[in-house]
Image (cartoon, rainbow, N blue to C red):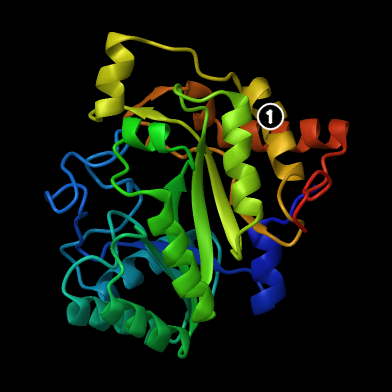
């Protein structure tokens, strides 16, 4: 299809199809509890951008069991990646979080662990724990960057400066832990040149993969209140996919692409509504990329 999909990487690495299971570690966020801010990032929902995570009132083992049953009702599988998705999953009591990580990877069908977090929420002790986990299973750390532009970061209430992100990437790379970076396109405070500057920056980093999303406006967020007061235009499907083709060509061909669009909860999504038709979006990406002969890395200056 012209880009390095996560499914290809998983099949190559594990030898068969694997499924990611979204778990809840019971964490909060330093950008919510007052440590570095309150209210969270402007786009973040009340669930900490984890609309599809499991019930935090259940143990990790119970969450895994329930999720596997749902997957296997549709498609028989024997390999899973445990994904601590919502809020900030290295933030809290380090010993308790270590216990939850180990509980997840003790499941014989769990072949890897992915942990979503903030670069300003990884303590020295936590780096040691992550290194230990990495010695026992395949580990990915997902860092929410969203943009390299400080003015945009202040608008979204990100709560940390770019240098903090760079240090976290360095620390994890030095420990041979794969990093997946989250980026958001179509921010109302950025033009396409600025968006591409973020992509080009990511192309220079020693990172394993990237998650790209177009901005989703969800009800119950501060972004929604701003959008409701002063609506702005969001990219239509073909417009976004066309720009996405340029983005893909600017990324190194060996970088794994884990996501291409936003994935907001349908019950809370206000705009853009076209993202809810996943099959249509996937088919349109395939057809437009084929028409343009999109090839990952073609315009990358840093391979």
**Residue at position x 33%, y 45% in the image:** 49
Left or right of 112, for residue 52: left
**Residue 244 drawn at (x, y percent):** 67, 35
Let me know if residue 260 appears in the view: no
Which quadrant of the structure image shows residue 82?
bottom left
**Image: 105 above or below 256:** below
**Residue at position x 87%, y 38% in the image:** 293
Q: How many marks?
A: 1
**Image: 219 above or below 16:** above
Of the pair 94 and 218, the residue shown nearer to us: 94
Left or right of 232, for residue 49: left
Q: Label 1 crowding class (10 Å Cα cut-off): few <14, some 14-19, many 20+?
A: some
**Residue 278 drawn at (x, y percent):** 57, 36
Of the pair 73 and 48, the residue shown nearer to us: 48
**Residue 25 drawn at (x, y percent):** 25, 66
Which quadrant of the structure image shows residue 189?
top left
**Residue 113 drawn at (x, y percent):** 44, 74
**Residue at position x 77%, y 57% in the image:** 253
Q: Which residue is mark 1?
A: 243
Let me know if residue 93 appears in the view: yes
Which quadrant of the structure image shows residue 63?
bottom left
Left or right of 291, for residue 156: left
Single out the residue that lies furthest toward the front.
Answer: 163
Element class at badge 1: helix
Quadrant where the C terminus is found in the figure: bottom right
**Residue at position x 83%, y 46% in the image:** 295
Single out the residue that lies furthest toward the top.
Answer: 230
**Image: 222 above or below 64:** above
């Amino acid at each position: 299809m012209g880009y390095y999909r996560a499914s290809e990487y998983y099949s190559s690495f594990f030898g068969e199809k694997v499924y990611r299971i979204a778990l809840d570690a019971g964490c909060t966020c330093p950008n919510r509890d007052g440590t570095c801010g309150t209210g969270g990032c402007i786009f973040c929902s009340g669930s900490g951008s984890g609309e599809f995570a499991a019930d935090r009132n259940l143990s990790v083992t119970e969450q895994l069991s329930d999720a596997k049953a749902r997957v296997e009702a549709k498609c028989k599988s024997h390999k899973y990646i445990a994904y601590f998705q919502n809020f900030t999953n290295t933030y809290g009591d380090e010993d308790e979080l270590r216990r939850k990580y180990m509980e997840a990877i003790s499941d014989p069908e769990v072949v890897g662990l992915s942990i979503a977090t903030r670069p300003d929420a990884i303590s020295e002790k936590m780096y040691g724990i992550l290194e230990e986990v990495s010695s026992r299973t395949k580990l990915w750390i997902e860092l929410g960057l969203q943009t390299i532009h400080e003015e945009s970061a202040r608008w979204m209430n990100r709560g940390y400066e770019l240098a903090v992100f760079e240090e976290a990437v360095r620390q994890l790379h030095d420990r041979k832990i794969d990093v997946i970076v989250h980026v958001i396109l179509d921010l109302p405070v950025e033009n396409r040149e600025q968006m591409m500057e973020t992509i080009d920056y990511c192309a220079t980093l020693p990172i394993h993969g990237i998650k790209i999303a177009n901005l989703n406006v969800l009800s119950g967020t501060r972004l929604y209140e701003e959008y409701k007061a002063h609506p702005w235009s969001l990219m239509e499907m073909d417009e976004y996919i066309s720009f996405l083709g340029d983005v893909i060509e600017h990324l190194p061909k060996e970088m794994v692409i884990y996501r291409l669009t936003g994935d907001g909860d349908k019950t809370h999504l206000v705009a853009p509504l076209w993202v809810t038709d996943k099959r249509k979006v996937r088919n349109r990406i395939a057809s437009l990329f084929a028409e343009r002969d999109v090839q990952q890395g073609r315009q990358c200056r840093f391979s």
